[in-house]
Structures are given as structure tokens and as C-alpha cells.
Amino acid sequence: MFKSIQLLMVLALISCQTKPLGSISASDSAPGSASASATEDRPDNLNSESLTQPSSDTTGVPLWTSRLGQAAEQPENQPAGQASEDHSAWINSWEPRDSKSWGLDNLEILSSVDGPFETVLRVYYPAGSASPSVSRKTESPLGGAQFYADLFLPAQTALSLTYYVRFAEGFDFVKGGKLPGLFGGVGASGGSIPNGEDGFSVRLMWRRDGQGEVYAYLPTSETYGTSIERGAWRFQPGIWYKLRQDIRLNTPDRADGEIQLWVNDTLVIDQTDLIFRTVDSLQIDGIFFSTFFGGGDVSWATPQDTSIDFANFSVTAVD
């Protein structure tokens, strides 16, 4: 049970930088997994103190920002860190689709939490939880949450998503898990490879030891999602990270699509020559809010109750 509270939304518009292309590979292993890119020579330079604090840059006007709390004000006597009582206004501001939504009971909007944000969205992952398929097969707890959100925006051919994320202190990354990203059409996940006309999704993932990657379901994917630049950056528990994902769809008869990813305002992935679609009618529709451990078997499950905090979701048009 939650009550809404206004979040200050920020977004930095950054000029596109150049970076050599990294390797890109598709998974043929367990559900939700992806083959790793070669990262042994990659510097682990995103863990420095100078890169782990959210940017205060507020240039650019977002097309949409998540509204944590349009319905009511927080009571003056509400204790710090206590959940609000009604989160319906927050959910509605995303224009969520009815289908493929689950885990909303694992969401909690907290106020006056330590850190740079007035309010955060906390997502819970009970011990033993992994993907929904694991929950169905083993009757284990359902952890995380998922929904497709259209954001009350017209479809786009290029869009930028920014948000902040913090893994709980002592977070065990196990084998990996999903983080939100952009999608188009009916989306794509769970081993359903899109055909170029029906949908696509571009989520992020954490992997073992906090390695980060882009995890995309594209017409060129095989069996499961495509792992792009695994290990391009590394998450640490207890630290806020600013993530910015830019997508530019391909011309339907060309492989000229692009995904760029910034971590704390540093460009870490610039992948070009991608195919998202084969028809003009398929465009970017919104945010695929998807987060859970997994992976499609119990080996991906979290061994302990844990959580991840999110803040300041926004989307902005890009060239």
C-alpha cells in the first residue's frame, strides 16, 4: 500500500561520442542467459569515486518523467524511509499495459531515504526468487516486477532513456538479472525471438560480480536475447549509478540501427549496424520495466532477501 510523492526528474543531454565497436554475441544457453563478450582487456574504470556520484546536469527537457506522487502530499509525521500508502498514481503515470505485468506487490515508494534523491522506487527480491518461469516450476517466491509502459507518448524512431539505480549493500549478483530498457511493438522476452514486424526489447543486465551489459531481443537474436558488450562496466553494491540508453532504429531495408549506453555520463557502449525492424510501422513505444534474477532455473536465484533502488526515470528525443 503506497502513497505518491513527487520525484525531481533530471536528464543530461550529451553529445554523441565515438568508441570502437565491441563484440556482440547471441545466447544458446539457459533461458535468460547470453554469451559473454571478451572483456579481459577492458579497464574497470567505472568504479572510481569520481564516476559513482549522480550528475547534477539538468540540461534538456524530457518528453516524459515518472511521477512519484501526483495524488497526495506526504504527512508531516511520516517516518524517514517509510512507504507511501497509494502507488496507483505513480503506476498510472506510466500508462502500463495490462498484459505481461506482474510483481507490482514487490514495488515500494520510499521517502527521505539516504542519498541524493527525495524519493526512490525500491524493488524487492525474496530469497530463492528468480524469473517467473522458475516461480511457476518450483513454487519459489516471485521476485522483482515487470510491465510494459507506453508513457502517453507517440511512437518514436529514436529515443533516450535515463534512470538511476543502486543495488542494496551486500547484494549478491549470483549469475545475473534484468534491468529496465526501451521496447517497441509487443516487446520481446522469455525466448520469444521477434520477427522484425512484431516487436523488440533492449533491456540491461547485471552479471556475475556486477558486470553490466545491454541485453537485446532483436530479429537477429538466436534462442534468447543478444548479449552486447558484457563487462563494459561493473556495478558495485551501495552506489548510485546513472544509466542512459539511446536507441536509433534502423531503416527497414538496412542494418543501420544503433544502441549507445552511458554510465555516469561516460559512453561505454556504441553498437552500430543493428537490425531492430523490417517495417516502418514498428517503432519505439516506451519503457520495458523488467527486473528480476535470471535466467530460467534455480541456479540464478538470489540466496537472500535483497532489493534494488531506482530513481528519476525520464525519456528524451534524440536525433
Image (spheres, helix red, strand yellow):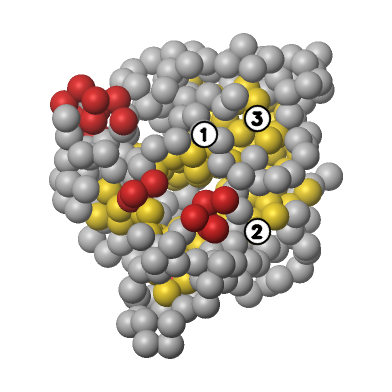
Nearest to viewer (mark 3 / mark 1): 1
Q: Is 82 placed left or right of 196 in the picture?
A: left
Query: Dot 3: within a 10 Å radius of its alpha carbon, few (fewer than 14), some, or many (20 or more) residues?
Result: many
x and y, in percent, of residue 164 in the image = 51, 60
Q: Amino acid at mark 2?
A: Thr
Quadrant of the rendered structure where residue 59 is? bottom right
Answer above or below: position of 114 versus 256: below
Front-most of residues 169 and 81: 81
Q: CA distance from mark 2 to mark 1?
A: 21 Å
Label placed on residue 65: 2
Q: Which residue is mark 3?
A: 184
Of mark 3 and mark 1, the one earlier in the sequence is: 1
Front-most of residues 235 and 92: 92
Of mark 2 and mark 1, the one earlier in the sequence is: 2
Q: Secondary structure at mark 3?
A: strand
Nearest to viewer (mark 2 / mark 1): 1
x and y, in percent, of residue 244 in the image = 61, 52
Quadrant of the rendered structure where residue 276 is? top right
- Residue sitting at 77 percent across and 16 percent down? 279
- Residue sitting at 21 percent across and 48 percent down? 126
Q: Secondary structure at mark 2?
A: strand
- Residue sitting at 34 percent across and 75 percent down? 81
- Residue sitting at 20 percent across and 22 percent down? 137
Q: Would residue 260 be visible to someone looking at this image? A: no
x and y, in percent, of residue 208 in the image = 31, 42
Q: Is 59 placed left or right of 201 in the picture?
A: right
Q: CA distance from mark 3 to mark 2?
A: 18 Å
Label placed on residue 98: 1
Q: Is 172 placed left or right of 80 in the picture?
A: left
Answer above or below: position of 280 versus 106: above
Q: Amino acid at mark 1?
A: Asp
